[in-house]
Amino acid sequence: MKRTPTSPAKTRSSNRRSVRQSASPSDRLQLRYLAHARSGDKGDTANVGLIALDPEYFPILVREVTRARVARHFKGMVTEVERFELPNLNALNFLLHGALDGGGTISLKTDAQGKVYSTALLRMEIPVPRELARRLAPR
């Protein structure tokens, strides 16, 4: 189910402009200010869930956290990236193929179960409306 114009972001108090309607200049912000994440393993594939901290951030995640951008972020560490949208959870799910050097039981990697991939993804910077970056970024 895709978000509609009657989504929660539009029904919030009128004194707070929806981040979705930004035509203003943008700044870069790490994903950790917009989402939280969980990761784990399935064989040689790391599975990373990225969940918006607020439903109004989900459209930004959908627009900016693309399969190609995630693949560039993990360049040299994965062979392929798949992305799935979970709008009812305000979340994205990524499968990072080839990330675990064979998987938990045979890999010599320090993180053979792929637990650190969520933290690494949260360090990725994306463009966000300047107003939102100023509101969320540490001072």
Image (cartoon, rainbow, N blue to C red):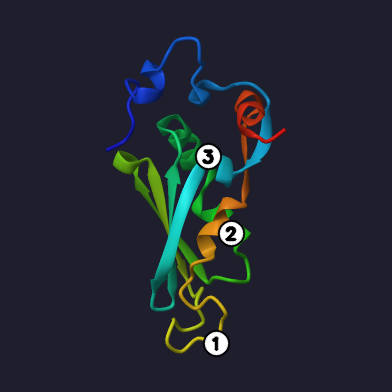
Which label number is shown at residue 34?
3
Cα distance between the residues tagged 2 and 1? 19 Å
Q: Is residue 47 visible?
A: no
Amino acid residing under circle 1: Leu
Q: Earlier in the sequence, mark 2 or mark 1?
A: 1
Residue 44: percent from left, percent from top: 43, 78
Cα distance between the residues tagged 3 and 1? 33 Å
Instruction: Name, please, the residue furthest toward the left.
Output: 1
Instruction: Name, please, the residue furthest toward the right.
Output: 139
Cα distance between the residues tagged 2 and 3? 14 Å
Q: Residue at x 59, y 71 (%)?
A: 77
Instruction: Name, please, the residue furthest toward the bottom.
Output: 106
Q: Quadrant of the C terminus?
A: top right
Q: Quadrant of residue 47?
A: bottom left
Looking at the rendered structure, the secondary structure element under dot 3 is loop
Q: Which residue is mark 1?
A: 108
Q: How many numbered markers are drawn? A: 3
Q: Earlier in the sequence, mark 2 or mark 3?
A: 3
Please say if the residues under marks 3 and 1 sit with CB atoms less than 8 Å apart.
no
Q: Which residue is mark 2?
A: 120
Q: Earlier in the sequence, mark 3 or mark 1?
A: 3
Q: Nearer the viewer, residue 108 or 83?
A: 108
Q: Nearer the viewer, residue 58 or 111?
A: 111
